Amino acid sequence: MTTATEIRQLTYRAAISEAIRQEMTRDPMVVVMGEDVAGGAASDNPEHQDAWGGVLGVTQGLIEEFGRDRVRDTPITESAFVGCGVGAAATGLRPVVELMFIGFLGVCLDQLTNQAAKMRYMFGGKASIPLTIRTMVGAGFRAAAQHSDSMYSTFVHFPGLKVVAPSTPGDAKGLLIAAIRDNDPVIFCEHKVLYDTTGPVPEGDYVIPLGVADVKREGTDVTIVAISRMVHVALDAAGRLANEGISAEVIDPRTLSPLDEGTILDSVRKTGRLVVVDEDNPRCSVATDIAALAATGALEYLNAPVKLVTPPHTPVPFSPALEDIFVPTPQRVIDAVHEAMI
Amino acid sequence: MDIDVEQLAWIYERMQLIRHFEERLHTDFAGGGVPGFVHLYAGEEAVAVGVCSNLNDSDFITSTHRGHGHCIAKGVDIDSMMAEIYGKATGACKGKGGSMHIADTSKGMLGANGIVGGGPPLACGAGLTAKIKGVGQVSVCFFGDGASNQGTTFEGMNLAGIWKLPVVFICENNGYAEATGAEYSVSAEDIATRARGFDIPSITVDGQDVFAMYEASREAVARARRGEGPTFIEAKTYRYYGHFEGDMLRYRTREEEELHRSRDCIQRFRTQATEAGLMTAEHLDEIEGRAANAIEHAVKFAMESADPDPRELLTDVYVDFPADSMWPFQTAPQFTAR
């Protein structure tokens, strides 16, 4: 890990923006494209330029610095611009493509799973695809079923893709820089609820290697593996569990593919209990994958069945009353830990 | 015509290499020796060769499931192609891609592609690289009448149009998408007319006439190199064999096939070149002989090549990934070579 000079408090949004800006400065082959990553492309009015800067403002300011050649608004044609990113990556650019919401993956799935993910293998190692797909995940915005998915598990399923889901501003910066520099296609999943959260972010060239989990809280009685926004839910639960004398270790895999199996297994062997907290659909998911990891790699250490805390296997509901039940809460994590402690 | 004997000889050699390559595969497939799905390009040689005669190694092409002709026209090594089709370690892709995925990025050949319509977005990406690097490369997208109906093709044309990408779209209209005729599946008499909706200059060309293909694509490639954006060329052509080898062709008549064979692009080239006094029959025969020998050599090379090392199963998935995690949740089997 590169150590950076100074640590400031930044939002998750600003940390991501800083990572992109730094990499665009460092490498002229880095280009950004996506729907309204700047906005106002048809207008000559200077005030209309950068009208959006990304739907939630993450890429704001980039065209001012790098111009429209390298910050490209695209038509709403995900197959074309995601595939364009794949072809550009195969031929020498290092594109950072924004797929606005992960729920739009169905529109461009072939370009990711049949083209980006398989090209290197099909071509016997003669191609590399240094492509980063930034995409927004997660419920909590009352955005209903097609704009609230997590779905990173879908990408983990495909060999050839790497998948990253940072939970803090610092991790977001360090992992995004690593993703952009990586020579494989990386799906970088940003949780929309986290954009305004703040945390310490090192300045400068701060790189967190892909495939390395982070122990967000050390503990001895139970291992809680939590992903993306759920890390904060798990930490909240762990704090409250400490008050009743239960010491929970919270592990954030940070990268879902490759998964840092060693850190998870070591922790499970130490605590003997595993709770997995995940916002993605529960069937065939990263959560069940981690449960399978414990079952195949550490069953003899387990003192209780593995507990999952996930949404129900339903689409994300719109009604605030329903969405608030859908998303796992600290109380559900506490309840699961209690079940595991018996 | 502004074309010298050396270039004519190259065109004839490439067309003959493709024809002999495909004829040999047709024969060997029938004999049961060729594994997997094979889609032959015989009959369409003038399209790939006419277009690629205007390209350099630094230019890019995307291809289709019917990609052997594009590979040969773009200069991919014939031995490595045949070895790839036989799944051998010496194959262009180390035997891991097969007929439908032959690629050679060092020649700008970005892969045959098993997905109909998979190529146009990729070609736009190569075009974007060319545009940003600004060294005059072009990107050629080969696709068929079938792919002309895919959304990716329309999306790619739109993107190339708005960004003025140096992309040349080559629609190989061979009349059939699998077993379905274009007359049924394409809602247009000439597919080239579809480009008009994107304000992309387009033309329909006799794809059995390599000189016509050469001329049309020369202008399109020049436009792209000048930064004037995409061009769309529809080549009316015909595949002599089925969609794939083993296709019984119960959807077209023998009369139709004979009609198209009577307009064979290679025979036509011979006639044109000799009648115009550009090349002699002896020279052409000599070129054909060399092509036939090259294919014979390629088959021998493929047959004598070793299978891939079993360890190759797990490599080339990523540039960089923990090696011990390629076979999760289980004890990996012991590898033994066949």
Image (cartoon, coloured by chain):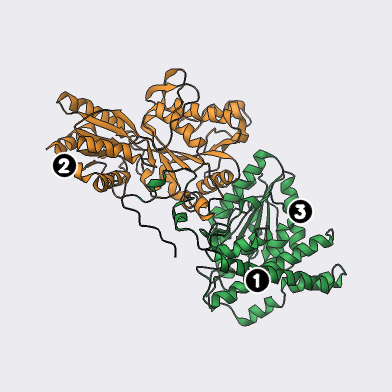
Chain colours: A orange, B green
Q: Residue at x 71, y 57 (%)?
A: B52
Give the x, y percent position of residue A314: 28, 47
Q: Nearer the viewer, residue B328 or A75?
A: B328
Please give the name of the residue rendered at 14% of the width and 26% of the height, measured from the top-left corner: A244
| Observer-nearest of A77 and B57 | B57
In the structure shown, which secondary structural element does the residue marked by tag 2 occupy? loop
Q: Earlier in the sequence, mark 1 or mark 3?
A: 3
Taking the spot 58% from the left edge, 78% from the top edge, the residue there is: B252
Mark closer to the observer (1, 3): 1
Label 3 close to label 2 by CB (< 8 Å): no
For disc 1, the neighbor class at 10 Å (few under 14, some 14 to 19, many from 20) is some
Quarter of the view holding residue B301: bottom right
Amino acid type, label 3? Glu
Q: Residues within 10 Å of mark 2 (few under 14, many from 20)?
A: some
Identify residue type, mark 2.
Ala
Q: Is residue B124 left or right of residue A331?
A: right
Amino acid of disc 1? Glu
Which residue in the protein does label 2 denote?
Answer: A304
Q: In which quarter of the image is residue A48?
A: top right
